[in-house]
Amino acid sequence: MNKREFKDNVYTELAKIAKAMANPHRLEIIDLLAQGPFSVEQIANYTGMSIANASQHLQTLKNAKLVKISRDGNFINYSLAGENVFNAWTGLRELGFAYNAQVEKVIRDFRNGQGGGMDAIDTETLAKLLKKDEIVLLDVRPEEEYNRGHIHKAISAPIENLDAYLKKLPKKKMVVAYCRGPFCVYADEAVAFLKNKGYNAKRMDEGYPEWMQKGLPIEVSE
């Protein structure tokens, strides 16, 4: 193999990874799988795709070695092949924030429309507030995901049941909601709902995977 063949071959193989990720549905799947394993039925439900469509996208990611499968009885679960896959996704996301102003505009327009606004707390600030016990932290993801792992001191309050938790929330403290990541809308819905009820509410600007990625304290309920 000469030098030209070497370069052609290695860049071709790397391009397969980039090509597998170059699809909005597959990026959303990668973002979802950062929470942990899911079945194709769950992935289809959370992403709004048909099971057949979700299966096709998962097969593409699997062929590119970006996801792997495991069996749980009669069920097949999909998960990220490794931490580097999530790191690649967050790197791509940050690239978009840095050089594509439309990304931030879409987020800003959506959050302003929801009534929550762009007032978010970054990970470092949240860690300090938690340490001082100055906030109430709500994990508004489904309870199954909370049980797999959640931010230290977070209370499970799935978005569909949030109304039931209001009596337990002190209005003297700021309430911070978080979910799967910066594009997860559960936290935005929670903030808009809480503000409407008179709470001082904000969302975490990222999510549980980013918190864990930074080595900050977590807990597992399972």
Image: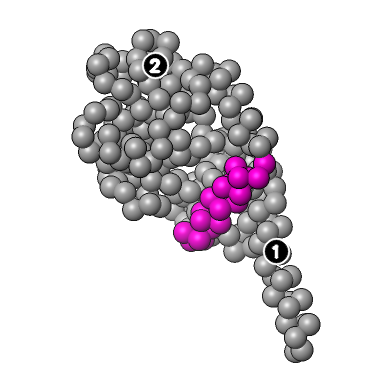
Q: Secondary structure at mark 1?
A: helix
Q: Is residue 191 depicted above or below 207 in this figure?
A: above
Seen at 46% across and 17% down, the residue is 192
Q: Could you tell me what secondary structure mostly forms the magenta stretch? A: helix
Marks 2 and 1 sit apart, C-alpha to C-alpha, by 44 Å
46 left or right of 158? Answer: right
The residue positioned farthest toward the left in the image shown: 132
Name the foreground residue: 120 vs 155: 120
Q: Quadrant of residue 51?
A: top right
Q: Amino acid at mark 1?
A: Lys
Residue with the mark numbered 2: 194
Seen at 35% across and 15% down, the residue is 199
The residue positioned farthest toward the top in the image shown: 197
- Residue 16: image tag: 1
Seen at 70% across and 51% down, the residue is 22
Tell me which label, 2 or 1, sits earlier in the chain. Answer: 1
Q: Which residues are magenta?
A: 80-100
Pointers 2 and 1 in contact (C-beta within 8 Å): no
71 left or right of 125? Answer: right
Question: For the residue carrying disc 2, how many other residues have a C-alpha within 10 Å: few (<14), some (14-19), or many (20+)?
Answer: many
Q: Secondary structure at mark 2?
A: helix
Residue 4 position in % (x across, y down):
78, 82
The residue positioned farthest toward the bottom in the image shown: 1
Quarter of the picture containing the N terminus is bottom right
Q: Quadrant of residue 101?
A: top right
Q: Amino acid at mark 2?
A: Leu
* Whether residue 129 is visible: yes
